Amino acid sequence: VQDRHSDNSHLALQAKHTEQHEGRLYNIPLEELSAVFPHGLPHRFQQQVLTFNEARVMVRKPALELLAYLKGSNFSHPAVRYVIYGERGTGKTMTLCHVVHYCSRQGWLVLHIPDAHLWVKNCKELLQSSYNKDRLDQPLQASVWLKNFKASNERFLQEIKTQKKYMWGKRECTEEGRPLREVVEQGLARVRSASDAVGVLLRELKQQSHRGSFRLLVAVDGVNALWGRSTLRKEDKSPVCPEELTLVHNLRKMLMNDWSGGAIVTTLSQTGSLFKPSSAYTPQELLGKEGFDALDPFVPIPVPNYSPKEFESCYGYYLERRWLQHEKGQGWGGKRGMRVLGLELVSSKWAKKLDKLNTDFCTHRDAQSFAVPSVSLQGPRTFPPCASGLISSVCPCTPRVST
Amino acid sequence: MVTAPRLPELQECLENSLRDAQGGIVGVSVQAQQRSGQSPGCSEQSRPCGVQRGRSGRVRPAGPGPCRPPSRRAGPWAERGGAGMAARAGRCCRAGLSCGALLSPALLSPAVLSRAPATPRWGRAAFSSAPAVSGREGPQAREGSVRRRGRTLQFVRSAAPPRTERMAVDQDWSSVYPTAAAFKPASVPLPIRMGYPVKGGVPPPKEGNLELIKIPNFLHLTPPAIKKHCAALKDFCTEWPSALDSDEKCEQHFPIEIETVDYVSSGTSIRNPKARVVTLRVKLSSLNLDDHAKKKLIKLVGERYCQETDVLTITTDRCPLRRQNYDYSMHLLTVLYHESWKTEKWESEKSEEDMEEYVWENSHSQKNALDTLLRIKASENVSNVTKEELLASEVVKNYRNSVIALKNEGETESNISQYKESVKKLLNIQA
């Protein structure tokens, strides 16, 4: 078990993750984590990083597949679009983050949009765009994203120069040949023009990527938001179509495969999506006709639940970190028990349940009460019945009969 | 009071009688012998000797105990001679009839089967046998008994065993239920239970079960009954043509099916407005339609077409007579056929949303694929590649098929993986 969790980060550095490493967890140093992922990690994973004080990402087959494609791709051809899809809680965002980490280690310029759904809902301020009367600006979302982008790609912003002169309003302008960093700072300083700054940034990157001085990775999580519906309303209460939003419009242009020198990796996400049934997870269901036609032809990459090997690895990791605790210690036929019970659990969902159990245990231990916490196993996917058996046996809160 | 010694006949009678579970007398063998002069003492008695068993179970021996005055009914016979009476009574006894007030001298030994305290005053002696009386009935009134309830008297009917017990297994069921009738538990020899079960128990039995009576039953339409109906109707039918011996041949020669319903009811009028409805069914494969005509026809008829069976169903009832409705439905079919063959000017405006199935030609998918391929070729500095060449190439054909399958059949694992492979080949992605 120990060798599973050894520090395979050097392998990640050399990008040598192969099939033999499948199921193992590799470590990302925390400084690098904050540099590469100012945004974009799933919330649960962030909590885990805080708890364990280390970031361990499991190497899984879909990610390996994607990395193989990226390694073998021809950068003079138009950018290939990859769409990661799967049911809820199977690890799509983690796969995307693995790819982003790999690409940033390889020195790519990573354009990471953590959740496109955030751009089509819950927007407090909508300004009419000065560039195009029909479109709407979202200053807050744009500035937040610019900040995070700047944090992760400082080096590139210095190197890449603008190719055109851009006028920000009546007086301010950015000359040709200035580093892109000025565009970003302009957007951060003048929040009103943040959306336009994002648009300029995307345009410049798209035009310059084919030169070969840098590789561009466009990573969008929840790409189905761009072609869905939005809950935003204009001042006259009429609904806003996503294409009327500047950010969405520019991002859509970015996702077209009319540029070369990079790749586009996207994720479909039902969680956070608007007006989509919770059972939808396939590309056509979530993207709709418009989205499918826009992204076509793309390479769909399915992400399944944990395989037994991956499950064992994760379970062993939690055991090792003392996150899971047995009354009888390690020897409870943990893995054997798993095989006997024949469990096949969802990766993050199971983790959620166990975390809840453990937090309950911590609170209960202080209170010296041995009531079994009621583990509500509801969710869109029902666990196999033996799961409850597992968890209650794993749970240390079973009342001690001796008292 | 000292009871008088019993008559030997009475004693015999008592011994021979069938007793039920409670020791009460159930049946008695009636001895139809003429014994005359055996007990002159009793001959004056205008009272039947018998055993009367009251409710308390007390056996009151009739006989020379308390001498009772002759009953009123026995009046005219009392004066007659004993022998004549005996003969008469004997005849009656032999017949096993239950006579009302029958004078029966001690010559006979009838038994009065009565559990209730039938007062001797009434003098009702019933000669009836109850062969099998279940103890279930309890101390209820039995045959020919009279129950006194308060001041009034109720003649309680005897509970005869249900008819089902006497039914043979191979009986003719259509005579039990010749027509539609309510469910009669005593006539249906099936152990049916219906209803909400008692707690911890079973649904109620069929006796007195309203649920079974309420629902319609088809006990009158068993296969043998229907066979009989067919046999009766056969006289009104003509022979089935021998050339039409299979379904396909029927379809081929008679593609249109007309369905009409006739209604018969007992009443003053033979008319029924429901009889005017005519349903016409035809398979579109038997009509001469090309692709455009078929799609147009399906759009015109809408709900009346069934995709799985390829059957068009037209139901007409707007005219008052059946013949008129039939003519109208044929007219509708003709009009639909001819109209679907015509092409109107506005049909050229048919857009993608109107299409019944996905057509890859001139779709976004085709456009995207071609653009991508052209860009790839341009990046490789390969020129002079025409669209037609690209469209005719293997990878594009593969891609086209996978997209059509994905759109028309929906998304399945196999469809999506097929699409993935085709895109990888199209864009030349190597792992």
Image (tube, coloured by chain):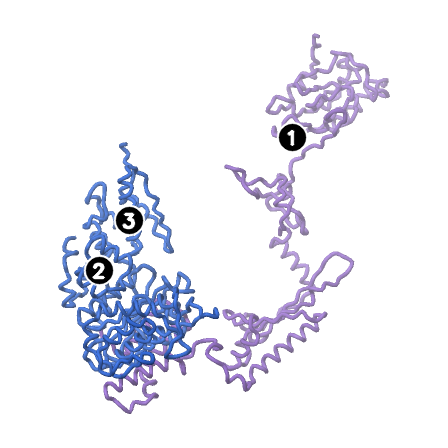
Q: Position of residue B321 (x, y in %)?
A: 72, 70
Give SS at disc 2. Answer: strand
Q: Are marks 3 and 2 in contact (CB under 8 Å)?
A: no
Pick whichever, B71 or A76, lies toward us: A76
Work out how far the residue at label 3 is from the one at label 2, CA to CA, in angstroms. Answer: 23 Å
The image quadrant that residue B411 belongs to is: bottom left
Q: Does residue B42 appear anywhere in the picture?
A: yes
The disc labelled 1 sits on which kind of residue?
Pro
Which chain is mark 1 on?
Answer: B
- Provide the residue designation for mark 1: B131
Q: Colour of chain B?
A: purple
Q: Colour of chain A?
A: blue
Q: Relative to A232, is B261 on the left or the right?
A: right
The disc labelled 3 sits on which kind of residue?
Leu
Pick whichever, A321 or B119, lies toward us: A321
Which chain is mark 2 on?
Answer: A
Crowding at mark 1 (Cα within 10 Å: few <14, some 14-19, many 20+): few
In the rendered view, would you say A71 is above or below A328?
below
Q: Position of residue A163 (x, y in %)?
A: 25, 83
- Provide the residue designation for mark 3: A341
The disc labelled 2 sits on which kind of residue?
Met
Q: Residue at x 26, y 40 (%)?
A: A365
Give SS at disc 3. Answer: helix
Per the rendering, the mark at residue A58 is 2
Work out how far the residue at label 3 is from the one at label 1, CA to CA, in angstroms. Answer: 67 Å
Precedes in sequence: disc 3 or disc 2: 2
Q: Residue furthest top?
A: B2
